[in-house]
Image (cartoon, rainbow, N blue to C red):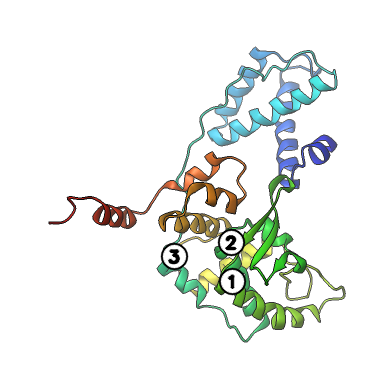
């Protein structure tokens, strides 16, 4: 745990999943009568993989478990606790690549109209919505935003992402107005209800810092008010941010920077385009699309 937290800068979620994966493996080893970490070999690993597939786990889950255990055995090798890594030559199963869901502009319009902007919580909810869609930041990054991270003079957020990687993300007029309105009015009213002076941008009804779970619940309530039949979670707003940028002609590298992706391959899942956009591009671009 110390190695993951301190040396690898892993998030609490990553540490939690790694430990769960280790417990699954240790439970399997106990069932096989193996009680030493240097005993498993490639045959043991193959039997383990078969047991995972028998549980009908998705390729994504199996892939993550292999990755966790490969990393764990690398750590054991470094600490001279084992001589070889039995997971070293195990190839990760190809992941299913579902196309990320996104919202159409008409659906977004309905969401932006549901909040009462004269109410502190309404102002907060509008600011959350405008921030998530206007910047594409993750819900964990939104949860961690502090007042000092917002620079209204140049219109940027200072964001700490996965692996504590830092980046600046610009925001536009709508997010700026919503944030200013909330920070100058609603947030002060919420702050007066709390005992401590919270630094967090987004506060709950008691004046404390709003959690990621709280942000998800707020979005769900907005969806109910807008009478939308689609499921909207914070990540769907991130998907929508990326899809809309690419559909309007933004280049992939810029979107990669905005999203805080380490690898371009992570951003490439957004290169799907809507049928309407595809038709529009064709009609406007192909020499023989019109008479």
Q: Position of residue 166 (x, y in %)?
A: 71, 51
Q: Residue 148, image x and y in percent?
A: 77, 67
Residue on which the image places disc 1: 175
Residue at the disc numbered 2 = 135
- Residue 227 visible somewhere in the drawing: no
Which quarter of the rendering shows the N terminus? top right
> Relative to the observer, which residue lies in front, 167 or 22?
167
Q: Residue at x 57, y 58 (%)?
A: 136
Q: Secondary structure at mark 3?
A: loop
Outermost residue toward the left in this view: 291
- The vertical placement of 213 against 41, above or below, is below
* Foreground: disc 2 or disc 3: 2
Q: In the picture provided, is 246 more to the left or to the right than 154?
A: left
Question: Residue at the location (62% across, 17% down)?
Answer: 89
To which residue does mark 3 refer? 229
Please name which of the two marks, 3 or 1, marks the residue nearer to the observer.
1
Q: For residue 82, which quarter of the picture?
A: top right
Q: Are marks 3 and 1 in contact (CB under 8 Å)?
A: no
Which of marks 1 and 3 precedes in the sequence? 1
């Amino acid at each position: 745990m110390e190695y993951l937290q301190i040396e690898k800068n892993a998030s609490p979620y990553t540490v939690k999943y790694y430990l769960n994966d280790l417990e699954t493996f240790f439970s399997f080893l106990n069932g096989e009568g193996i009680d030493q970490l240097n005993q498993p070999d490639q045959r043991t690993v193959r039997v383990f993989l078969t047991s995972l597939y028998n549980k009908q786990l998705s390729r994504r889950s199996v892939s993550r478990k292999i990755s966790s255990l490969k990393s764990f055995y690398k750590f054991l090798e470094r600490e001279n606790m084992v001589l070889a890594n039995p997971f070293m030559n195990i190839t990760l199963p190809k992941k299913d690549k579902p196309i990320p869901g996104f919202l159409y502009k008409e659906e977004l319009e309905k969401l932006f109209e549901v909040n009462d902007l004269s109410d502190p919580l309404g102002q907060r909810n509008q600011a959350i919505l405008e921030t998530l869609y206007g910047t594409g930041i993750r819900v964990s990054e939104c949860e961690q935003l502090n007042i000092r991270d917002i620079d209204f003079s140049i219109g940027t957020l200072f964001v700490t992402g996965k692996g504590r990687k830092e980046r600046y993300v610009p925001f536009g007029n709508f997010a700026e107005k919503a944030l200013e309105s909330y920070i100058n009015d609603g947030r002060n009213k919420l702050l007066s209800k709390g005992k401590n002076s919270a630094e967090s941008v987004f506060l709950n009804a008691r004046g404390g810092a709003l959690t990621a779970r709280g942000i998800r619940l707020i979005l769900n309530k907005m969806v109910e008010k807008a009478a939308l039949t689609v499921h909207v979670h914070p990540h769907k707003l991130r998907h929508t941010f990326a899809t809309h940028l690419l559909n309007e002609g933004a280049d992939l590298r810029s979107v990669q920077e905005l999203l805080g992706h380490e690898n371009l391959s992570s951003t490439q899942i957004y290169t799907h385009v809507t049928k309407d956009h595809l038709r529009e591009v064709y009609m406007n671009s192909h020499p023989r699309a019109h008479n």
